Image: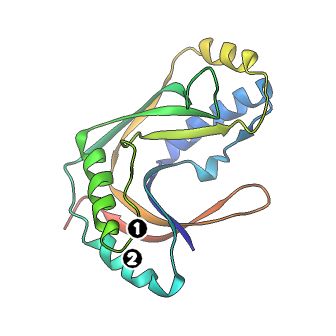
Amino acid sequence: MRLFTGIALPGEITGHLSGLIDQLRPTAQLRWSPSSNLHLTTKFIGEWPEDRIDEMKRALSSVPVPDPIYIQVRGFGWFPNPHSPRVLWVGVHASDGLRDLARTTDETVAKLGVATEKKPYSPHLTLARINGPASLLDLKRAIAGLPSDELGEFAVEAWHLYLSRPGPSGSVYTRLADYSLTQK
């Protein structure tokens, strides 16, 4: 099983991003993210034995509740950089609670043998992947011509353990467990 933890987006934010993807899609031949897959990853776990899923769920339930998490979705960027892009993303600007959640989740699953993160946590929402040579001039112009790069904000109430299954048109994500941020 391929697992990760993350935060689901509220319908309003998903709707804004879906409309944005529909608007930008004709400008470049990229592998655009399906709106149903848009989420904010807090920890990529990777392959995990199915017979140990309950152990993972129990461990994650012990992650301390961070301070409230408030998220603003705004701005665009490229990984690894704008000159040799592989990913188009939308920025996530959040209160310190988001980094705390990512850090404590990383520390918790490390006790189960999951590799710790080597890079600093960089929250973002992946809009598209660039798999090969692609003309991005029209896409960059379209982004520059948007009336605003503000796509919404929300308070996070829960985070989730997800299963990622590869499919013919991209991965399919299934929630396996929910963890409240409003009580403990």
* Element at label 2: helix
The answer to whether residue 56 is left or right of residue 144 is left
Residue position for label 1: 114
Question: Which of the two residues, 168 or 12, is positioned nearer the viewer here?
Answer: 168
Residue position for label 2: 56
Residue 142 in the image: above or below residue 161: above
Across and down, in percent, residue 130 comes to: 71, 36
Across and down, in percent, residue 148 comes to: 52, 17
Q: Residue 15, labelled with which disc?
A: none
Q: Quadrant of residue 29?
A: top right
Category of crowding for the residue at label 2, using alpha-carbon neighbours closer than 10 angstroms: few (below 14), some (14–19), many (at least 20): some
The answer to whether residue 181 is left or right of residue 67 is right
* Element at label 1: loop
Across and down, in percent, residue 12 comes to: 50, 41
Question: Which of the two residues, 17 or 50, is positioned nearer the viewer here?
Answer: 50
- Residue at 75 percent across and 35 percent down: it is 30
Q: Whole-Å distance between the Cαs marked 1 and 2? A: 10 Å
Q: Amino acid at mark 2?
A: Met
